[in-house]
Amino acid sequence: EIRNLISLFPQNEALLKWLATVLRIRHPHAVRRLKERCSGKTIILHVSCRQYLHRSRQSMRSFAGSGCVSVLVVGSDQGYPDQLGFEFDGELMVLPVPDSYEKLASKVFYAYLILYLCDQSGFLVKIDDDVRLQDLERFNRLLEHIKGQQNQYCGKLIQVSHRGQCHG
């Protein structure tokens, strides 16, 4: 599995360059579309599943005036799990992982990996499919503040109960 391979060799730049080359060879049109749409921009990554595409599209509409590029991420049930690849039509990114809640971590991992391998050097905000932007001005101010701090990663721990579990 690709995730296990990378976790064994996270500092191996040659491996990542090789994976990027393989991705460009196997999926040239998807790579080109992703670069054209996202390169150097702030990306709002709406992680979802096909069952909830309507919620995801509502979330995307709420971010429309933010100046960010929205990318909707879902899995696929086409029987090619754990392969390096993806489809991208300019809005929807379909990844080679099962399209289920139980594989959410794999979807997020593959989305990050694909964006990295396609050399997307912009800023990335990952959100769930049921998140709606309420205050555009505040969001943009916060985003600029976070960008100015040169952090590699940031987040806010929240206590949200979902099916008897706390998420943050």
Image (spheres, rainbow, N blue to C red):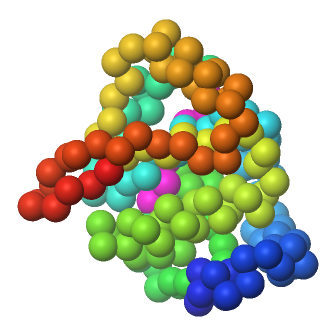
> In the rendered view, does 51 fall on the left or right side of 104?
left
Q: Is residue 26 visible?
A: no
Q: Is residue 34 magenta?
A: no
> In the rendered view, does 19 fall on the left or right side of 86?
right
Q: Picture coordinates of residue 25 (x, y %)?
A: 85, 73
Q: Main secondary structure of the magenta part?
A: strand
Most foreground residue, 54 or 18: 18
Residue at screen point 58% across, 25% down = 143
Q: Picture coordinates of residue 162 (x, y %)?
A: 16, 55
Q: On the image, which quarter does residue 19 sit in?
A: bottom right
Residue at screen point 44% across, 32% down = 60
Residue at screen point 66% across, 41% down = 151
Residue at screen point 34% across, 29% down = 132
Q: Is residue 4 visible?
A: yes
Q: Which residues are magenta?
A: 68-74
Most foreground residue, 44 or 153: 153
Q: Picture coordinates of residue 156 (x, y %)?
A: 41, 40
Residue 76 vs 58, above or below: the answer is below
